[in-house]
Amino acid sequence: MQNFKKLLSQRLLDAINIGFANPTITENDLIDMLEYPPDTTMGDIALPCFKLSRTLRRSPVQIAQIIAENLNDEAIKKAEPVNGYLNISISDSYLERVLNTDILTKGDSYGASDLGKGKTVVLDYSSPNVAKPFHIGHLGTTVIGHSLKKLHQFVGYDCVGINYLGDWGTQFGKMIVAYKKWGNRDEINAGGIDKLVELYVKFHHAAEEDPALNDEARAEFRKLELNDEENIALWKWFIEISVAEYKKTYGQLGIEFDSYKGESFYTDKMPAQVQKLRDMNLLKIDDGASIVDLEEYNMPPCLILKRDGSTLYPTRDIAAAVYRKQTYNFDKAIYVTSAGQSLHFAQWFKVVELMGYDWYDKLVHVPYGTVSINGAKLATRTGNVILLKDLFAQAIEKVAEIMEEKNPDLENKDKVAEAVGVGAIVFYYLSSNRIRDINFVLEDALSFDGNTGPYVQYTYARTCSLLEKAGDFKEDLDIIFTADEERELIKTLARFPEKVIEAIEAYEPSIITRYILDVAAAFNRFYHNCQILSANDEAVLNTRIKLTKATNFVLGNAFELICLKKTKKI
Ligand code: ARG
């Protein structure tokens, strides 16, 4: 509809120029004013004329009337003034053009654009803390982050996905102590990250009884900082084991990162930034620690160095941002984390600004709400957490059971169950606004009937099997719309490109998720009310195959944007 809005605003401007003397209105003003009415029986798009009243010096009712009289285009079926609104309906010939020229010709790239051409976006997401559990709290950063990457790529940006691993810090001292006391190399090699987490949890329980263990951990971490050979080797090994495990989960989601430069990479890049802060007189000593005072900006101070001179989370983030600016010269750097870290980001973004870096306003924090499962919250230290891989495994198992009943002869059952099970979790998660807290109810997420991942994947598979049966459509046969369901479907499909833009502007993948539901609903109404394969007129049949193909493209393209696999058969 983006194109329709553009075309319409040109015609509206023409009509205004005929009906009014010296109007000071631009096409873009008009594009911004156009609205989609909630009830489409009134029209497909509306111009609320009260917004023009002041400039055109007439009442909204008169304005709507005058524009209606002068508005004319093949793309417009009807323009009706109603109570100060101008309600416009789209003509079949325009819908035809959308179907043929926009969607079917562009296919896989329908919805894409070159809006971001020549610009780079760096996205920092997932970024788990090594040796700590990769739990469902990480689902948000992982799938929102990746979806934002896909969305930006789709509109032409060069994207760099960075997994800023939490691979440095006192937890490694703890891990080293725990390993030296209770660990077993073969067991860890065989058991992977779970064994590491077990050690981590064991350490915390033991340290509650015997706080001296914490001193030992600090000493081991100190040795690590001083490049002690044994500790460095252990540290590298812990990371290797953890990353191998994360990659399995990323693989299930179809996610790959361009960089795994974690916190440790910035160790030698911090001193220069600390020095700069000092030189600029931005550092204050407070109780031995070095801080940047942010009182003027209504924030608590940003901690840069502890009393003992060691660096902190914000220090590393500042150094990493400078490095990324130098390395990638980004136009935007996006950080996806839980809303619990919002203050941290606001603080160090401000510090970057105070340091005189003129790119401070290219830093974007994208926060999201908390996740619980069946009402239960998470706790890391006690080991009482739900791991992301376990949640996926559970979903896959349940889907496999459902499919065994529904379609026992399906080929590649395991692969399909994985795509649908993981997809169900992702879709459920991305269905609500990111900032809302989410309570997972697995049954709801996995249902084939609700507004779920399985339902939309099933709809996609339905388009595939229809197309397989129908064979190719004919290019040059006339298009004939004979049912409102057909028109509603194509109008829904026409909105995809602007949904992509909306999702990017709001950093909100749920806009795509909800749009997918609109498409699935419109397609299923069409499917149930129009005979597709048994239509008895050749042109009607061909039109319906084209509509099915167009739906297949749009669903497929939209799935890609939210980490949902395109499954041809379910
Ligand atoms: N490792 C951090 C955590 O799990 C997230 C890192 C987010 N990115 C950043 N640049 N601070 O809480």
Image: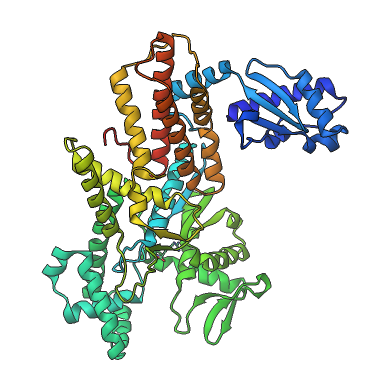
With 360 as the anchor, is 159 left or right in this view?
Answer: left
Position of the C terminus by quadrant: top left
Please tell me which residue is depicted at 52% across the width and 42% down the height of the picture. Answer: 119
Q: Is residue 185 visible?
A: yes
**Nearer to me, 254 or 261:** 254
Ligand number 1: quarter of image: bottom left
Residue 45: which quarter of the image? Answer: top right
How many numbered marks are there? 0
Residue furthest out toward the front: 529
Position of the N terminus by quadrant: top right
Q: Is residue 116 above or below residue 282?
A: above
Please tell me which residue is depicted at 67% across the width and 26% down the height of the picture. Answer: 88
Q: Is residue 256 visible?
A: no
Residue furthest out toward the left: 186
Q: Is residue 365 above or below residue 512?
A: below
Residue 174: which quarter of the image? Answer: bottom left
> In x, y percent, where is residue 116?
53, 39
Q: Is residue 426 above or below residue 101?
A: below
Please tell me which residue is depicted at 52% across the width and 17% down the height of the picture. Answer: 96
> In x, y percent, where is residue 50?
79, 37
> In x, y percent, where is residue 408?
17, 38
